[in-house]
Amino acid sequence: QVQLVESGGGLVQAGGSLGLSCAASGRSFSNYAMGWFRQAPGKEREFVAAINWSGIGTNYADSVKGRFTISRDNAQNTVHLQMKSLKPEDTAVYYCASGRLGSATMTSARFYSYWGQGTQVTVSS
């Protein structure tokens, strides 16, 4: 049974910072890429960031490039998303996902096999 558990969401003012974490279990964590997606009310789930199996390769949506940083710790089976310069449009439920492959180039949700329950991030203006 693969489990992904996100933590670290909350309420922050615009311009502030927030860090998300995702703890994985039940799978060979270091063999697969990990990704973060988000879904705002009334919108489709969208890609935020991905990191390849080794942690060397990363990929970001244009909307978060330069503000968000994804990282992973294969010894701890965790993946992190550090967010800075947050904007109200970053408000969404953020989901951690485990990829079908090891590459960070997967930006579509269909390339991810397992998902966390999501954590709410709210950025006030």
Image (cartoon, helix red, strand yellow):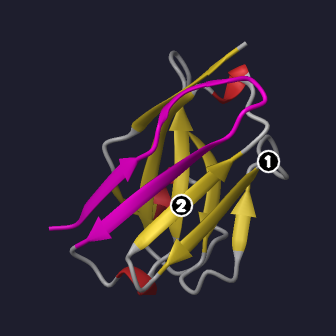
Q: Amino acid at mark 1?
A: Arg
Q: Residues within 10 Å of mark 2 (few under 14, many from 20)?
A: many
| Image location (x, y in percent) of residue 77 | 38, 76
Q: Is residue 28 left or right of residue 92?
A: left
Q: Residues within 10 Å of mark 1 (few under 14, many from 20)?
A: some
Quadrant location of the N terminus? bottom left
Magenta region's main secondary structure? strand
The local secondary structure at tag 1 comes to loop
Q: From where the camera sits, is residue 124 visible? A: yes
Label 2 sits on residue = 80
Name the residue located 38 percent from the left edge and 50 percent from the top edge: 6
Please state the extent of the stretch shown in magenta in the rendering.
1-25
Q: Amino acid at mark 2?
A: His
33 or 56: nearer the viewer: 56
112 or 79: nearer the viewer: 79
Q: Is residue 3 magenta?
A: yes
- Number of dots carrying numbers: 2
Label 1 sits on residue = 67
Quadrant location of the C terminus? top right
The quadrant in which residue 90 appears is top right
| Image location (x, y in percent) of residue 25 | 25, 71
Q: Is residue 18 above or below residue 29?
A: above
Name the residue located 41 percent from the left edge and 58 percent from the top edge: 22
51 or 83: nearer the viewer: 83
The local secondary structure at tag 2 comes to strand
Q: Earlier in the sequence, mark 1 or mark 2?
A: 1
The quadrant in which residue 107 appears is bottom right
Q: From where the camera sits, is residue 45 visible? A: no
Q: Is residue 8 left or right of residue 86?
A: left
Q: Is residue 11 above or below residue 6?
A: above
The quadrant in which residue 85 appears is top right
Q: Is residue 87 above or below residue 51?
A: above
